[in-house]
Image: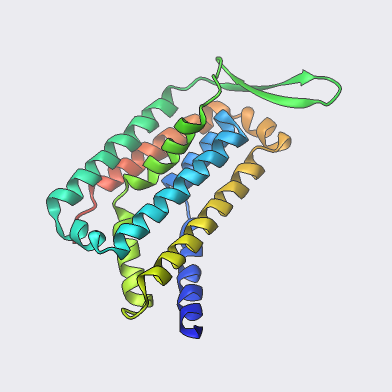
Amino acid sequence: MSAYVIELVTLMTIFSLVIVSPGADLAMVLRQSMVHGRRAAIVTSFGLGVSLLFHISYTILGLGAIISKSVALFNIVKWCGVAYLVYIGIKALRAGALTVENTSPPDRTLALSQKPVAEQGLIKAFVLGFATNALNPKPVFFFLSIFATVVSVHTPAMVRFGYGLVMASCLILWFVGVSYFMTTPRMRAAFSRVSKWIDRVSGVVFIGLGLKLVTEKAS
């Protein structure tokens, strides 16, 4: 049992550095928080976590090695990811400005409006998170490498799935925390003043990540 604990701690040490680093996932949660509010951002966070578990699952089952070795399969996933990131980047660049206004003097609650912004459905918010991660082939290499390096070949598959569940749960908790922080009244008021540039920057980030993905190659 102690060997499994060591494996899990080692995995989480590496993974914790990955989840806090800037990337498409963080950019997506930040924009969801600012544009569609806390609920949409939290649901998107769950979509990212489930997508992570999806990547880990097929890696454990051995499909990750097949995808990484097959140029055709890898390119299908890669170009779908490129198209998706560029698409949401263009949407962000075309988005209108946000404003924060008082909706009721007694409780001084803040409402976020956009030219105007319709409330985002929970399914759409979840799919946005899931697709952002699922259509990125880079996790294939990441999980193949860390599982091959850290996890023993003798570790049972169910234990490996347990590792994946812990990692996905931590990812969700991290982005839920980001969602809460970014949707506090003070943060939303501050970001609304530069909302136009938030969309511009996030749009450029998404498109840049998509173009960067073009350079990825199967091993």
What x and y, as percent, mark residue 182?
63, 40
- The number of callouts visible is 0
In the image: residue 137, left or right of residue 118: left
Q: Outermost residue, bottom direction?
A: 2
Query: Who's the residue at 69% across and 30% down the image?
Result: 189
Residue situated in front as seen by the camera: 192 or 126: 126
What x and y, as percent, mark residue 59?
30, 62
Vertical placement of residue 104 versus 17, above or below: above
Does the image show residue 128? yes
Residue situated in front as seen by the camera: 77 or 122: 122
Q: Indicate the colouring scheme.
A: rainbow
What x and y, as percent, mark residue 25?
45, 46
Vertical placement of residue 59 versus 13, above or below: above
Query: Who's the residue at 53% across and 39% down the image?
Result: 43
Q: Outermost residue, right direction?
A: 106
What x and y, as percent, mark residue 111?
68, 24
Query: Who's the residue at 13% across and 49% down the image?
Result: 72
Q: Quadrant of the C terminus?
A: bottom left
